[in-house]
Amino acid sequence: MSAPVRGDAEPRWSVRGEHREGARLRLYCFHHAGGSASEFARWHRYLPEDVDVCAVQLPGRGARVKERPHTRMRPLVEELAGQLETDLPMVFFGHSFGALVAFELARALTEAGGPVPLHVFLSARPAPGLVTYRGSIHDLPEEEFLDVMDSRHGGVPVELREHPELRGMVLPYFRADYEVIETYRPAAAAPVPVPATVLGGTDDSIPLEQLEAWREHLSGPFGLRMFPGDHFYLRPRRTAVLGLVRAVAG
């Protein structure tokens, strides 16, 4: 897959908690399925002043709620690549679904011969081609979809059950993100030559071997770190996780 590399694009996909004029490094953060840029809203407070934190906001949610969400990986990545600000060295952090997006974006940038990330953090996601759950859910009837979401991840907000208006706003991008995941097929291509750290929670449902399998898709220096916690271990373990990011940022 090839993708444009532009440093002058309007950065409408990026949400910043704070604009940092003298930044020397840009951290792009990619959220989980059904998530939004708000997952990383406070990260800038815990990183050095010279790190510009950009949380990626995919279409269909937040300020982009009127935009049609992507349902396939390739066009999502191609459009996102055209929106990157490449005037500074970049680091990617992708959580769950966001890990696949970050990885495929790094691949697209590599194939395009443009600036590539100095490091990618791939969190709580099996390696490409591997899945934790079998079967497709993105096209299930509404109540069944919510039931499966609840059984897999727990804690589906009561408001989604009780308020049709809220479901009408939220479920389209939930379904779209899952359709991207369920139709995604990794390319038969050479490993991506970028340094990477794979992260996981010890109580998550993802087997350790599925995290270690990322080695097959990357040819740069590779590390694996596990943290106490479930699929969203990064919330209570934010300080430790951002310590790894700080170490890469120098």
Image: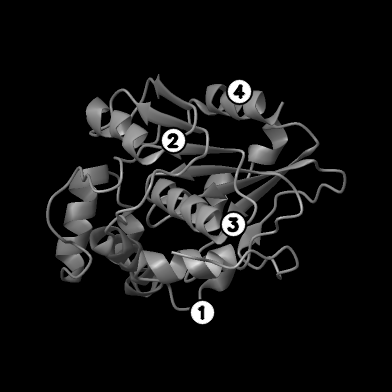
* Colour logic: one colour
Per the image, label 2 sits on a secondary structure element best described as loop
- Residue found at x 26% / y 26%: 208
Q: Residues within 10 Å of mark 2 (few under 14, many from 20)?
A: some
Per the image, label 1 sits on a secondary structure element best described as loop
- Residue found at x 52% / y 33%: 195
Q: Which residue is mark 2?
A: 219
Q: CA distance from mark 3 to mark 4?
A: 30 Å
Q: Decide: marks 1, 4 in contact (CB < 8 A)? A: no
- The earlier-in-sequence mark between 3 and 4 is 3
Whole-percent x, y for residue 183 in the image: 25, 64
Q: Is residue 19 left or right of residue 217?
A: right
Q: CA distance from mark 1 to mark 4?
A: 36 Å
- Residue found at x 65% / y 57%: 15
Q: CA distance from mark 3 to mark 2?
A: 16 Å
Q: CA distance from mark 1 to mark 2?
A: 39 Å
Q: Is residue 137 left or right of residue 10?
A: left
Q: Which residue is mark 1?
A: 66
Tag in front: 1 or 3: 3
At label 2, the amino acid type is Ser
At label 4, the amino acid type is Gly
Q: Which residue is mark 3?
A: 113
Tag in front: 3 or 4: 3
